[in-house]
Amino acid sequence: MSKRRSNGLLNSLLGAITGGGVRVVDLTMTLDQKVPTIVLPPELGQSWPFRLEEISRYDHRGPNTYWNNMSCGEHTGTHFDAPIHWISGKDLPDNATDTIPPEMFLAHACVVDCTLEAEKDPDYLLTIQKVEEWEEENGKIPPRSWLVMRTDWSMKFDPVEYLNLDDTGAHTPGPHMDLVPWLIEERDVVGFGCEAVGTDAGQAQHFNIPFPCHHLMHGHGRFGLPALTNLDKLPPQGSLFITPPLKIRQGSGSPVRVLALVEE
């Protein structure tokens, strides 16, 4: 009985997807050589840019095959940040892409629209007050949900404009330092997602706790989803994120194709 009921649930979901009752939204940047890559101070190690090298394309190198070699850093394009990525999460159990329980890669998402604020101020910080106002209109954030900051930053297709660097570092929106512990302790989120190249604001190295989203989220076993796209196609509440990273042994993260299921 339970097996038949389980199959019925899955068949209902598949039927809704194929029949149009559930819409699948791709929230992922296309990986190519132009995809923006995070830039660190020159004295620190740097992430490789994405590179594709053709092995064969139905030619003398392989008459029946088209395929490529590729190389990039784990945190390239739309990607998943695992707790082991930051020093605060290095000693946690199940903290890497190969050991995180797979059920954690499916979670409800709450999308907070900050487009107007980010358009006026590239250093805009999402605050507790803004999220509480969002909750008054859309309902409380359910436990173990993604909190996602929509800014339409992913619509900046010029990599220079997207990274927005100057002598003081990057100028991109992100969470206020006070918001991060509140999301963990008061709302029990599974992680934080955004459209910028990293989950922290561009100027977060100057905060009292530098890079608080990385330090606190990963220190509490939570995750990050930077460089998301198409957040304008999602409702404030109700979408389901599918976010499995590559199963890299002791991986700190990986590029990921993030999909959202949205009930029509």
Image: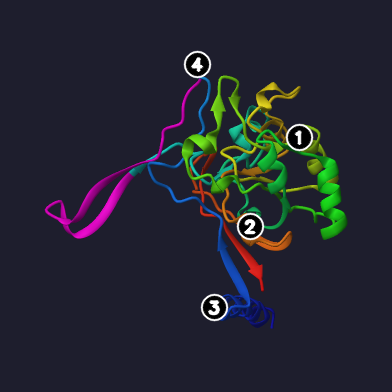
The tag earlier along the polypeptide, 3 or 2, is 3
Label 1, label 3: how many angstroms apart (C-alpha)? Answer: 40 Å
Residue 44 pos. (x, y %): 51, 20
- Contact between marks 4 and 3 (CB within 8 A): the answer is no
Q: Is residue 7 left or right of residue 188?
A: left
Query: Spatial distance from mark 1 to mark 4, Cα to Cα?
Result: 27 Å
Whole-percent x, y for residue 72 in the image: 41, 38
Amino acid at the residue labelled 2: Asp
Which residues make up the magenta segment?
Answer: 43-69
Above/below status of 237 relative to 22: above
Q: Secondary structure at mark 2?
A: helix
Residue located farthest toward the right when viewing the structure as drawn:
136
- Please report whichever mark, 1 or 2, sits nearer to the chain's N-terminal start: 1
Badge 1 or badge 3: first in the primary sequence = 3
Q: Which residue is mark 3?
A: 18
Tag in front: 1 or 2: 2
Query: Label 3 amino acid?
Result: Thr
Q: Is residue 77 magenta?
A: no
Q: Is residue 126 left or right of residue 249?
A: right
Mark nearer the viewer, 3 or 2: 2
Q: Quadrant of the N terminus?
A: bottom right
Location of mark 1 (residue): 176
Q: Give the image location of residue 111, x and y in percent.
A: 71, 54
Quarter holding the C terminus is: bottom right
* Residue under the point 83% across and 41% down: 128
What's the residue at 45%, 36% (across, down)? 73
Q: Mark 2 or 4 closer to N-term?
A: 4
Residue extending farthest to the front is 120
Picture residue at 23% right of the left edge, 48% below the top: 55
Residue 37 seen in the figure:
no
Q: Which residue is mark 2?
A: 232
The reply to whether residue 158 is visible in this rendering is yes
